[in-house]
Structures are given as structure tokens and as C-alpha cells.
Image (cartoon, helix red, strand yellow):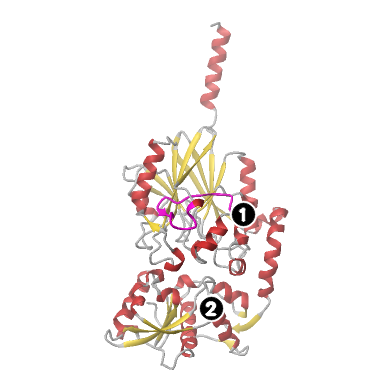
Amino acid sequence: MNLRNILTGCALAIIAMAAPAEEIIILHTNDTHSALDPDDKNLGGVLRRKVLIDSIRQEKPGRVLLVDCGDAVQGTLYYTLYKGEVERKMMNALGYDIAILGNHEFDNGLEVLANELSQLDADLITTNYDLSETPLDSLFTPYTIKTIGDCKIGFLAINLDPKGMIADSNAGKVKYTDGIKAANAMAWYLRNVEHTDKVIALTHVGYDTQNPPTPSDIELASSTEGIDIIIGGHSHTAVNPSKSRPAWKVPNAAGDTVLVAQAGSRGHYLGEITVDKDSPRAGYRLISVDKRLDNRIDSETAAILYPYRQGVDSLKTMKIGRLAQEFTVGSQLLLNWVADAMRDMGSRLTDRTVDVAIVNKGGIRRGLPAGHITKEMIMTMLPFDNKLVVMQLTGRDLMASIDVMKGRGGDGISGGVDISSIDPDKTYTVVTIDYLAQGGDYMKPLTRGKIMTRSEKRLDETMIDYIEGQHNRKITYRDDRPRM
């Protein structure tokens, strides 16, 4: 070899050593809940999200993956009116590569879900659900592998235990396997059989321990080996690395660091994770989806959404009442007002005196502003296919139900009974929703009650009737009850 060749070889070696690593970008969403338009605070919006995704793809052509961690549906009129059709079209327009199930994907049953998902272009995966006896079986695989450049990335998916969260009639014959065991086994397989460079777990189990009995993302990270990144959903947690809490780096069972990410809910954020095949480190940030992106809205995607938006907007103009004060989403004021209204509405279904009404905060998906209330607001606030039930329940089971509610920070409870002096041996007349009466949201004590009657209409329809019955009198509500 002559001197020139030696020098040339050395120069190329130096350039190769100095060349920057080829970064791979994982963009992620979770719990967008049919929030295709910006919310009352002008945050989110699927068209804005597309602007962000497209801009990142343009910066890193061929090196971007887009994943969703479940509950892409349920929560606005887009789902109430169109049963998932528009959400799937939007996900295809945005170019999702991988998607997993949330619990709300099941809300209209397995047949409807299978029809929705058969039209989705993304890879569908679940590692710890056995779907062999369901219409979903042919649509899902236990893992998927994506190769970008010379980096091979294996994806697995861990879902929550349907029992206590998804109505039995909607979950059908879905069989659950322990999430930690399934993740460990699949991570080993991806590492040692498929020889992937990275393993990423997509989950819909919740960030922390407030989602029993399914292992949380933190428990999953600390109890497994071989997983580099966990991207989660279900708890609506904005895991933001620019803040000290919640933690986004967690040691695993072998002492290695796992990045744990989650992008809040309702599309307010787009998560961005930067990985490099040759480095155990990964970068992570949450990007706000807001009005700064409006001047670049994609016209083709907007055209797909437009006809569906017309149907939604028509209900936004239908005023049904007036509210004297604002009820913020998640506030005890809103929860107890809904519970008090349910008690009044339930009293019209029976000749018995109703003692108390209870409702879970997860069933109330938005707040109400002061001023005019529209039909769209109520349908969005109470979007689920729930109906009122009046039941007989022992004081012992009523107290046990309230303990479940206290354990997650309190739900909605009406006036009518002092919860500190419930007689365990007395029988109470209770109003709730059928989902809770069947043990949904882990309210197993309610399954021991006896249902006496139920409403024919959905809860949102009953609430609309109730508000219209105020004959446009301004609704004023005062609640001095302490939190549970």
C-alpha cells in the first residue's frame, strides 16, 4: 500500500469516528380520547399534531417512527356520532406505524372494534392478551420489529387486566397474562432470538401504582430486564423531563436505566424520544401542541375531518340551559353536582326514597363553563354509553364502595347520607351507573347489590332532559361537603 492510500484510509477512519451517530426518533401519543379539535383552552388538535409530525419527519427523513399507546377514542362527539371511523382516518392520515389497545377501544364491543381496527394501517400488537377466541385475533401480533438504517428495534405491548376496568360484555373472551411475566419473556426473545438492538415496551397500564391490580409502568421497569424504553398510557401522566417529577429514568432488575415516558392526554403533547443504536442513553422531551402551529395546517387532512366536524358543530349551537359558575373538570364541585343530579333523576325512576348517588370521576370527561350550556357540552362531559340504575345495597357494601372511591382520591357522592355514619346492617337505596353496578372501575362491592330499575335513556340524554327541565333558570350550586 502506498503512502497516499494509507493517508486516505486514515482520513476516512477519522471521518467515520467523527461522524455523528444516526439518531432515530420515536414520536408517541396516548389517551387522545377523540380530541380531534383544540380544547376550551386552545390546546391540542389533530391537525396541529400533524404539522409537528411532518416537520420532524422532514428534518429526519426515514428515521422517524410514530406510535400510539391506546385510548385514541371515546371522549368527544366524534366518537359518539361516528363510532371510531374518523379517529382511524386521522391516524392513517398522520401515518402511525404502531398502535396498541387501550381500555376504551372496547367501549362498543369486539365486533365494532375489529371493524375499526381492520381499517387502520398501523401494526397492531399486544403481548399479554390472548385474542384467539375473539374477532381481533387475525389483526394483532405479539410484537413487531422496525429496522431503521442498521438499527433493529423490537416493540412489545403490555395491556391492563380487563377485569374490573372493561365491561365483561365488551371484553368477551380476551384472556389476560401477567404483564411483568409477558414483558420479561418477550424482551428476552427479542434480544436473544430476533437479536434486536433496542427493545421498547408500549403500554396501557398507567404510570404509577394507582391503577390496581395491573402492574404499572414503574413496576414494569423495575421488575424486568432487557427493556430500554417504556412508552405508556392510561393514567394521563405528563412525564416531562424538564421537571423533577415524575421520574423518567428508572433502574430495572439488573440495575440498568429504563426511560419511562408518557404524553399526558387529549393530544396536548407530542412525545419525542431520540435513540442511538450504539448508546444506552436516550433523549426525551414533550412538545406542546398549541396555536403556534395553526398557520401550517395540512389542507388534505383538514378536508378529511371537515364533514365530520360539521356534525359535531351543529350540536355546539343547541343551548339547553345556563350555569351560574364554572365547574372545572375533575373538581369535587363538578363531581358532586353530577351525583346530586343523578340522585334527583334516579328518584323519578322509583317510588322509594333514594339515599345517595355515586359516580366515578373517570366517567366525567370535561368541565362546564359559566354561562350557556349546550347539548354538545353535556354529551362530551358524559360520553359513555351508561344508564342510571337504582339498586338496593347493604351499608357494609356501600362503605366498601366508598373506600374504593377514597383510594383513588375521591369520586362523586351526592347529599342525602352522612358517609361517616353509615349503618353496615341497613339496606340503602343507591343510584349509580350500570358500568359501576357491574363492577367497572374496580367497584366490586356494587356487584353485590340488587338492581331494582334502570333508565331507558343514556346518562347524557337524561342529564340533558334534567337541565332543560330547569326552564332556562340559571343553575346555582353550593356544596360545602368535605372531600372524601
Counting every numbered tag in the picture gives 2
Q: Kindly identify the amino acid type of the residue bearing the numbered disc 1.
A: Arg
The residue at which mark 2 appears reads as 458
- Above or below residue 455? Residue 196 is above
* Range covered by the magenta-colored residues: 119-137
Which secondary structure class fits the magenta region best? loop
Q: CA distance from mark 2 to mark 1?
A: 32 Å
Q: Kindly identify the amino acid type of the residue bearing the numbered disc 2.
A: Arg
Image x and y of residue 62, in percent: 60, 38
Image x and y of residue 203, in percent: 44, 53
User: Quarter-wise, where is residue 245 in the image?
Assistant: bottom left
290 displayed left or right of 413: right
Residue 230 magenta-highlighted: no
- Above or below residue 353? Residue 251 is above
Q: Which residue reaches farthest bottom?
A: 351
- Which residue does the image show at 49% across and 84% down from the upper left? 341
- Which residue does the image show at 55% across and 12% down from the upper left? 7
Pair 2/1: label in front:
2
Q: Nearer the viewer, residue 379 or 49?
A: 379
> Mark 1 falls on what kind of element?
helix
Which of pointers 2 and 1 lies earlier in the amino acid sequence? 1
Image x and y of residue 75, in percent: 55, 67
The residue at which mark 1 appears reads as 49
